[in-house]
Amino acid sequence: MDRVYTIKPNAFERHKKKYMRTVLILMIFAVLAGLGIAYLNSNDHSMDMYTYPFVIMMASAIMFFTIKKQLKRQEEIFYSYQLTIEENQIVREQMNLPTVTIPFNEIIEIIEGTADLRVLTVKSDSETILIHSGVEDYDEIKRRLEDVHSITPFQGGAKSWMEKNVFLVTIITLLAFATTYLASNKYVVIISGTFSLAVLSFGFYEIYTNKNIDPKVKKKMWWGIPVVYSILATIYYKLTGTL
């Protein structure tokens, strides 16, 4: 029997708290790092006591409105999730994302996450559908899929170190980014700059190849090109002394 499954009411609240906590910490860290770079590169610290409070207030206002806007958008996308289990296939639809369809006879693996993160991952050779516990009647979905294909518990070895430690990698990348601009030692600049570029390149690739990410987010990633150019220019300048 065909059935469409949608998101439970208030299911976004759990994701909202996690999203808010992560974004706030990263934004505050980024602002402090930016202020630190500006302070160390400033020749006249006498004006800092007047300019920094203004910069902090402006940055706080920008962060507030940015987070508020992004939260609203994330909530709209979150609640637009629809999962349809038909007679011979499973279909996932969501706002701004391409529809993913996996016929039952093409399913090669179904993995269920841990008790802390109940997520079913349905895979074919070319497609992946994620079904999280925020979807209504999650247990019913699981039973129906078990009739189609066996479900394997998550073993913990599928994710790379970077995927498991996204927050730590982000902090280290911000520190490496700041070091690239502040350090005078050529070897330190090369190491920190190369690490920053490697992480940015990996992030670009992962985002652009992931079908579960909003295309608008992918388009905004082009704003990272000036950052890449800035890092390359800084490395070149500190190695050669010219641009």
Image (cartoon, rainbow, N blue to C red):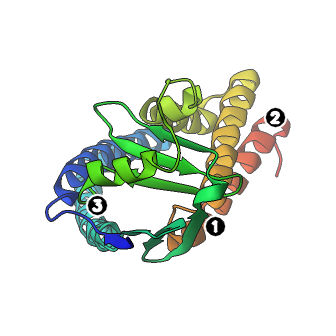
User: Going 39% across and 73% down the picture, which residue do you hit?
Assistant: 2
Q: Is residue 85 above or below residue 174?
A: below
Asked if one can make out residue 204 in the rendered structure from this viewpoint, the answer is yes
- The residue lying furthest to the left in this view is 10
Secondary structure of residue under mark 2: helix
User: Label 2 sits on what residue type?
Assistant: Leu
The image shows residue 60 at horizontal and vertical percentages of 24, 58
Specify whether 213 is left or right of 72: right
Q: Position of residue 235 (x, y in %)?
A: 75, 40
Name which of mark 3 and mark 2 comes first in the sequence.
3
Reading the image, the residue beneath label 2 is 239
| Disc 2 from disc 1: Cα separation | 27 Å
Q: Secondary structure at mark 1?
A: helix
> What residue did someone put label 1 on?
222
Quarter of the image with the N terminus in it: bottom left
**Tags 3 and 1 in contact by the CB under 8 Å rule?**
no
Q: Secondary structure at mark 3?
A: helix
Q: Where residue 125 sits in the image (x, y, percent)?
A: 71, 52
Place residue 35 in its image quadrant. Answer: top left
228 is higher (above) or lower (below) than 178: below
Q: Residue 158 or 195: which is nearer the viewer?
A: 158
State the residue at coordinates (60%, 63%).
103
- Which of 213/52 is in front? 213
* Residue type, numbered disc 3: Met
| Residue identified by numbered label 3 | 63
| Front residue of this view, candidates 18 and 83 | 83
Q: Is residue 44 visible?
A: no
